[in-house]
Image: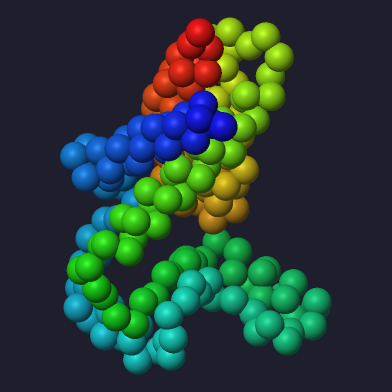
Amino acid sequence: MKKLLLGGFVGGLLIFIWQTISWTALPLHKVEYQKANNQDSIIQFLSSQFTSTGQYSIPRADENATAEEMEKAQQDLQGKPWAVVSYHSAYTTDMTNNILRGLITSIIAALFVCWVVMKQANATCSITALSVVLIGIAGYLFIPYSQHIWFETPDATSNFIDAIVAWSLCGIWLGWWLNKK
């Protein structure tokens, strides 16, 4: 139990530290949040259109549209501009809750991965480390890369780097920790 808890805690901490560096000290994610021209006018217009916080796909057929109406809407959209807008009705500078949730999420993910790799019989340090990295890449492929495929998000490379570095750090730690005699 000690190996699992300490392994997951330190592994999650390493992942969280990398995420912090990746988002704050490095320009890795700048492509995801570019400044728009006329941003004050844009946000004023969006505020007049959206009634609540949410993510909006624009343009989009009405949710009650028939299959034929949806198909026609897709055909009419072909070759035209489109957007996915994440709208928030109020900005807050307090990051305490986000930081705590991010740290806890990283620790829980590392605990899950630690538990899985602890079930490997006769695993070496390198097999443990490689297993952890492959689990991290699987998570990347399923979530951020799938988003990139369907919504053409600009973050495929930055999220791939995050997955490789964060899970490599965790994998190296777990490879050493779990195979320590």
Placement of 12 over or under 67, stated as above or below: above
- Name the residue rendered at 57%, 47% in the picture: 143
Specify whether residue 136 is in view. no
Q: Position of residue 113 (x, y in %)?
A: 58, 33
Q: How many marks?
A: 0
Q: Position of residue 92 (x, y in %)?
A: 24, 73
Along the line of sight, the residue nearer the viewer: 27 or 118: 118
- Name the residue rendered at 59%, 21% in the picture: 131
Placement of 125 over or under 65, stated as above or below: above
- Name the residue rendered at 46%, 50% in the picture: 105
Along the line of sight, the residue nearer the viewer: 83 or 164: 164
Specify whether residue 41 is in view. yes
Q: Position of residue 57 (x, y in %)?
A: 53, 71
Placement of 137 over or under 174, stated as above or below: below
Along the line of sight, the residue nearer the viewer: 65 or 131: 131
Lateral position of residue 140 relative to residue 172, left or right: right
